[in-house]
Amino acid sequence: MNLNELTIKEARLKLDSGKISSLDLTSACLAQIKKLNPDINAVLTVCEESALAGAKDADARLKKGERTELLGIPYLCKDNFTTKGIRTTAASKILENYIAPYDATVIRKLKEAGAVLLGKTNLDEFAHGASTENSAYGVTKNPLDLSRVAGGSSGGSTAGVAANMCIFAIGSDTGGSVRCPASFCGIVGLKPSYGRVSRFGLLSMTSSTDVVGVLAKTPYDTAVVLKEIAGNDKLDATSAPEKITDYKEAVNSFDFEDDFDKNNPELLKGLRVGWPKEYYLKELNPEILNNMKAVADKLKAAGAEIKEVSLPYTKYCVPVYYIITPSEISSNLARFDGIGWGLAKHETANLQEFYKTNRGLGFGAETKRRIMLGTYALSAGYYEAYYKKAQAVRTLIIEDFNKAFKDVDILLTPTEPHPAFKIGANSNDVLAMYLEDIFVSGASLAGLPAISIPAGLVDGLPVGAQLIGPRLREDLILKIAEFISKK
Amino acid sequence: MSITIEEIKHIAELSRLKLSDEEMLKLGSDLGSILDYIKTLKEVDTRKVKETAQVSGLSDVFREDEVKNWDREEILAALSQGELENDQLKVKRIL
């Protein structure tokens, strides 16, 4: 097995026992990036020099006897997190040459933990999309089928993990941007509860739903990374003050011996799994339905109870999301004015022309569409009909989840209505693209933790199952995800 | 639902975006189809529902207002894409 194919758990054992060095591991990942990135286009900026230096530093710490979870583990990060001294483009022309003067809190924490940053990954411009086709630097291709999208908007981070360019990756999820590509590329993608991980240094898109997400090869690895990056941060006033749970401990409760019987009905006794009927409409691809039933059967065999529940406002999630998101985008992206940093063509008649010219040149089509839609929804005469209305329906969507969690502990749904689609298939149909978010936007609007894990194949391509938990119960969804992932 | 070219021009003005005629036409039809879809929200009775603006469950989060020194070179680097004069950012006349 090549070193770059290791999980965190496997790499940890080898690093701690001195069988391999972080330099070996990091070099193997860098070699894989060099080999595959020309075809896949997952990575926008490779930081080879600083990665090798970081690996040597981690090796020195290991030699001194330091033993921590991510020491010496190489990772990739979505290019909408600020990294001091390394460019941060958000896959936009407007930030093509932007170098941030500070690290995002997540980057700082991972640096302190001794993880090694390999590079910055591709995304839909400013994370606006579900396919990574909206990048100003070209589409990211699905490593399992180069004619298909990797999903988005964290397509680069996800393809990077799926193609073994790194051991894990950081993404962001506003309305499905970690879970969608995880489903399309056959890996694990976690969207934590709103506020569980500091957003400081994550370029703001929709401030009321943006979260930092984890992309990894197993739920165990995901738990280990979450443990390192979660927690309150005084630089993010919306970060949750509650103490973090030991996520690793939670997944470890299923770290069974080889002789473990997954059909032991005592294992999940008492667990109530919700099957929300609005996510299983008759239009659902029958193969996806079968895969979901197989997941449910696995849980049932271990003693869990599957209960049908209803979330009647589900069909309004996407319309609400596509009012709230563009509205917050139109406000958040007002800061890109070309003054001081970012694209700036100075040959304009006056200040207004300067703003309009640079923003017109710097932003891509989807970003402009969202700014325009949001500005429209917030403009005089439409504010009540669109924005306030959407905020009210958002309350009803949240109440749906609250009611469901009185009867069940977690919800089990498909992540996406189909496997990865062909590049360009949705390009001319904005609405079709927005409907990609149909199963993932609810948890985002309600701020709930949700994870996508591989749940079989459809037409030879991976599809994901989504587990949604009550607020701050990342431990529970990770634990059940770990169980489902056990062979 | 269709959005008139005048409306698109007005929204582009508010958005501070210079758009080509072609872009404006495309946006008019895109926004129209998105708004048609979003219209389904009208079916929902929200007369007695309180709006949700955020889900953190927090309010009035304070921290110390400390001034931290920042290296001059770093400040200049952070603004390196702007026009600087005597270490100060130059902008076009407003009036």
Image (cartoon, rainbow, N blue to C red):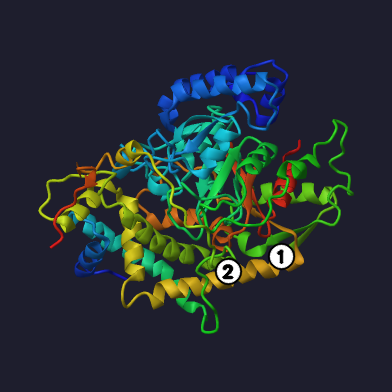
Quarter of the C terminus of chain A within the rendering:
top right
Residue under circle 2?
A397
Q: Residue at x 18, y 51 (%)?
A: B91
Identified at 25% across, 51% down, the residue is: A359
Sooner in the amino-acid sequence: mark 2 or mark 1 = 2
Amino acid type at mark 1: Phe
Q: Disc 2 is attached to a residue of which chain?
A: A
Determine the secondary structure under disc 1.
helix
Would you say the residues marked 2 and 1 are in contact, meaning their CB atoms lie under 8 Å apart? no
Residue A120 located left or right of residue A191: left
At label 2, the amino acid type is: Ile
Where is residue A185 shown, x and y percent of the image? 55, 38
Q: Position of residue A14 (x, y in %)?
A: 70, 20
Query: Can residue A411 be seen here?
Result: yes
Q: Residue at point 60% right, 26% down?
A: A72
Circle number at residue A405: 1
Residue depicted at x 51% and y 52%: A235
